[in-house]
Image: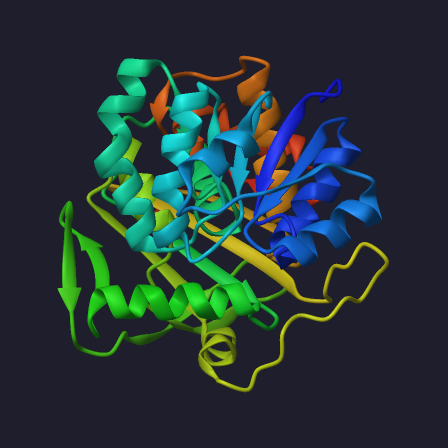
Amino acid sequence: MGSGQLVTVFGAYGHTGRFVVAELAARGFVPVLSGRNAQPLKELAHEHRLEARVASVDDPASLDRALAGTAAVINCAGPFASTVGPLIEAALRAEIPYLDVAAELEANLDTFAHYRERARDAGAVIVPAMAFFGGLGDLLATAAMGDWTEADEAHIAYALSNWHPTAGTRLSGAVSRERRGGHRLRYSGGQWERRTDAAPTLEWTFPEPMGPRPVIGEFTMADVVTVPQHLSIPDVTTYMTAEAARDVAAPHTPAPAAADESGRSNQTFLVDVVVRSGGAERRATAGGQDIYAVTAPLVTEALERVLTGRTKTVGVVSAGEIFDAADFLHALDPHITVDLHPQKQNA
């Protein structure tokens, strides 16, 4: 476990950040709380009897102080278009691993594009999108691939009972839409496409007892960035149940509300991954409760594996590239229920 190692959590007082702080502490790490807003930082530090270090992405020296003496940094502060670059630079200066929970496609793409060579040359570990969107789907796709070295297509379908977005989700979404200039992104034929047409509404057959559900096709999430970085799959598509897509888009959908003492909402999810190659199909699924809360065990498990050397490579890496995907997924029990299906042949 953490053995008292200090870990900086930037954006510690945010909705997801609070779950990450709690999970780190439960695993024996000592979170160092950081962020730009002094008052909520002070209140959270008082509540948990932890150290707070105010820092701003506009002040590199403050970030250096926030990371000083820590074993790693986890970035939970969106919009990630503003925080990723400065935090990665600070982590490189401090020579410590960097992980984030970013679901912003553009921020994820920037991380791979701008830091891949520098991180590899420095022997540094940078893990973007180590969260429900990005990390989980990537691990499932990697586990489904198994011993395949390439596949024709990967499909990652999300079934959420509802999607009550946090303020951070809304802000990050607005920043992404502004950067895309009204376009949407699709990954097809090994290339990114910028499209202006509406995403299609389709039907996806989830495993029983859920069964067929209407979904928004080409609802492009962070997995579509992470998967092609290390898996030879030219077509990667993500889907979202239509009701959840409407929830997150509606301006008056409330924020998530705690339904238990841990702060988790009553939202449930199922992630269904299908990888196809020729006439063969492989599938992997995972289910659980609260997409924001479950990000905490995902990123904390990743951190623990990085710090204990249970990794495959260095540089800017996707979850399935740096970790043993099947072993990682099973280690998340009881937070997530995983089913790695045997290979199936298409009729």
Q: x, y percentage for residue 267?
A: 67, 66
Between 153 and 173, the residue placed more toward the observer is 173
Quarter of the image with the N terminus is: top right
Between 314 and 325, the residue placed more toward the observer is 314
Asked whether residue 174 appears in the rendered view, the answer is yes
Residue plotted at (77% across, 26% down): 28
The picture quadrant where one finds residue 85 is top left
**Relative to 262, is 329 above or below?**
above
Between 267 and 317, the residue placed more toward the observer is 317
65 to the left or right of 45: left
Residue plotted at (42% across, 31% down): 90
Residue plotted at (53% across, 44% down): 55
Asked whether residue 345 appears in the rendered view, the answer is no
**Relative to 157, is 27 above or below?**
above
Residue plotted at (63% across, 48% down): 12
**Relative to 112, is 58 above or below?**
below
123 to the left or right of 140: left
Q: x, y percentage for residue 310?
A: 54, 15
The picture quadrant where one finds residue 40 is bottom right
Badge count: 0
Colour setting: rainbow
**Relative to 242, is 189 above or below?**
above
Q: x, y percentage for residue 243?
A: 51, 79
Farthest residue, direction right: 261
